[in-house]
Amino acid sequence: MDGLNPELMRGSLELMVLSVLSDGSKYGYLIQQRLKDASDELVDLKAGTLYPILHKLETKKMVRCRWDDSTGRRRKWYELTAAGKKQLKVRVDEWQAYVECLRRVLGPLADPSPMPA
Amino acid sequence: MPEREFELYLSVLSRMLRLNEQQKDAISDELRDHMEERFEELVRSGMNRDDAIRQALDEFGDAAGLAVDFTNVSRKRIRRIVMRSTVAVASLVAVCVFFLNDIDRQQPGLPGSGQLVAQNFVASTDAAPAAATEKLNAAGEKTASEIHKPIDFVVAGEVVAPAFLQEMTSGGFMDVPLGEFCEYVSALHNVSILLDTPALGDEGLTSDMPVTINLDPFPSLDENSKDKAANDSEKSNGASTAVSLQQGLDWITQKYELSWYVEEGIIHITSDVAEEQRQVSRSYFIRQFLIDGFTENSLIESVQLMTSGQWQNIDGLGGTLALVGDVLTIRQNWQTHREIELLLATLLDRKKEAAIQYPDESLRVAKLLEQRVAEVNFTEAPLSDLVPFLSDVSGLRIRIDEAAIQEEGWDLDTPISITLKNQSVRTILRLALKPLDLQAIVHEGCLKITSSSRAYETLNTVVYDVRDLDDNAGQLEQLETAIEATNDGPWMVRDGDGGVLLIPGGGRMVVRQTDEGHREIRQLLVAQRRAATLGKTFDATGTELTRTKDAIRASRRGPIEKRFYRVPSETADDLLTVLPASIDTVTWSNAAMFGQGTNLEKSLGTIVKVEVGQKVVRLSDAEAKNGRQMKAAGNNAAAVTGAVAGANVLVVPESVLIIEQTPAIHDKIEKFLQKLDMDVKGVRLDDVRNGGGMSGGGFF
């Protein structure tokens, strides 16, 4: 998690994982890579953090999984369930509302034009 | 492939996971896949082998931390599995027992109307404890109206189990579309049944999905069906049992991971996820429980821990509850409300032992399992042969959890070998299934063959009436400790997840445990009760402890008696171990021998120490000098001397030894203490109450 405040990220990890799954099923390693690519390597989720999150989402039935043995080793694929899709939408809306709110509260402090260092 | 390092990490992780073997394997497989792919990529990018291995492993962090994370997640998972598998239910039709044989692939025979009379079976089995026999008789004599007495503690909310759910149903279905099954049942019972197709669609299911289930009475009354096929296991002994509508709904929804609820008299069949998320509020009037010895907290705790629903305050999602005065309002899904209502009804009941779901059926199945079979001789015979055979000789309907068996890699054709003479059905099943890692459990009021790992996760709630074992002096707490210590569990407190034991008040003990766990508890309670009534010691299987038997008998002159010995604290600690070790050793409980006060061996001696304060001894000058009094007060009394009001005084911290022993042993203890130069007499509780007894008066 170089570069980003882990405290800030913690609340959004599930959301990020769900969003990565929104365009099709993936296995753990692929999810990790996708997060890294999509964030310009700012989000480098450790495997030890990712898997418990995936299992938690599975427990909550936000994702379901299936095993694939065709590659020679057992691979576990995850995909969003209907509940997961619903949850993703709700969380994205929440996040947008939150960002909007924060932007209003911070006002000029959060001005998009970069302040001179 | 750097398998060695990865396997080492995975095996360390596995050992620390509090999960079943299958879950552990799944996690290992998943992480191994990740490690190998990561390793390959790092090597491709130019990193050397050793660094790549280290890097790949480092990204998983330390195994211990990861194990805790996985286990925490699975604690919720286990609750969910439990929910799916126990949300069965409710009420029962008194004299009938329901057995379903899921492997029955034949179109079953005609529905029968016979009823099974409990007493016949009681008479035919001989291995069960007397207490259970009485219980069964009592249950057998209960009428339907008694069991379905109106539950008057629900003050707001729709009736959970409308009367039509108790109606007997029938029908054998083989690969029938779910929609057609619903139409059939709807017509038969004249009720509306709606399929929640959007919810089913979310799970990838449709109303066309084929279902197979036998809801006909068992054993069937159709004589011809006996020869139809090997797995058409029937026993026409004149007794047959019918299936109620709600039971049929429970069975079919469970088998296909669906759920159901009733709203405004309409039965809805939906996905278990949808049912779980559909919360309704109901209010329960709890004054009767408070009068009966429960507290608000113990009742809420029972409701939350003894049912399978999830709760906001425990799981972070799920139901909520609020108490206003004597009204407990709960927002939960319908199936959990059903369990809560059953739990509350069972708590108010005065039964010795009652499962909240299918109480009478569960006891009866347990009973039938103890029947002995003269001979069983199977060599490499398919599972689908052994099961009907046992079903046939015992009259037990045996369900097979095919999904669970497949998870273990077996099917109905898996060969089994077993040769035994004159053993109980339970023993035969245990020994035959063990090599396959399968188990037969009593669940939902019938016998089910499932995998050991599923059996381990399948918890039932049972209310035990233990008022007779409550001596108001902590014996129930001892019982709780003993059960949690000696029972394999799993226990939430010990293993991180699993069963829970509560003593909520009113002399009830509520336990959520596996079938095997409950069997152990039942045996322990039987042993306790026998010990209490016979004054002999039995171990949990009813065998007398021969080691101590003769010595106990020799030393016993009268019943165990509690006496109080007031001694200086310093000496008390030594006496705690010295007395049991020096005086008729075998008559003390093992716990006492190891210096612990608590024990379950009611007929053996115990000794505990209680600090009670200080004794101030005035000394004459001469005594102060030679310390004779000090010696009299205890050989090694660590006393504080000082001057108070001009006199020499000795302040001696004092303790009371509370010893439970026979009068004969008490005499020996007094003599022993005299030899130690201590003039201490054991005082009986009555003497203390009467203010007499001890020299110097004012015992406490």
Image (spheres, rainbow, N blue to C red):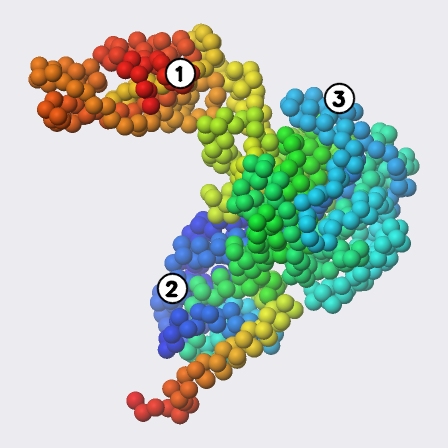
Q: Is residue B364 left or right of residue B498?
A: right
Q: Is residue B108 left or right of residue B14?
A: right
Q: Which mark is residue B58?
A: 2
Q: Residue at x 32, y 19 (%)?
A: B698
Image x and y of residue B187, in percent:
89, 54
Q: Chain of mark 2?
A: B
Label pair 2/1, CB-CB below 8 angstroms: no
Label 2 or label 1, whichever lies nearer to me, is 1
> Residue placed farthest to the front in the image?
B645
Residue labelled with disc 1: B690
Q: Secondary structure at mark 2?
A: helix
The residue type indicated by label 2 comes to Asp
Q: Earlier in the sequence, mark 2 or mark 3?
A: 2
Q: Earlier in the sequence, mark 1 or mark 3?
A: 3
Residue labelled with disc 3: B123
Q: CA distance from mark 2 to mark 3?
A: 65 Å
Q: Residue at x 69, y 32 (%)?
A: B363
Q: Is residue B135 left or right of residue B74?
A: right
Q: Classify mark 3: residues with Cα within 10 Å, few (<14), some (14-19) or many (20+).
A: few
Q: Classify mark 2: residues with Cα within 10 Å, few (<14), some (14-19) or many (20+).
A: some
Instruction: State which quarter of the image contains the C terminus of chain B.
Output: top left
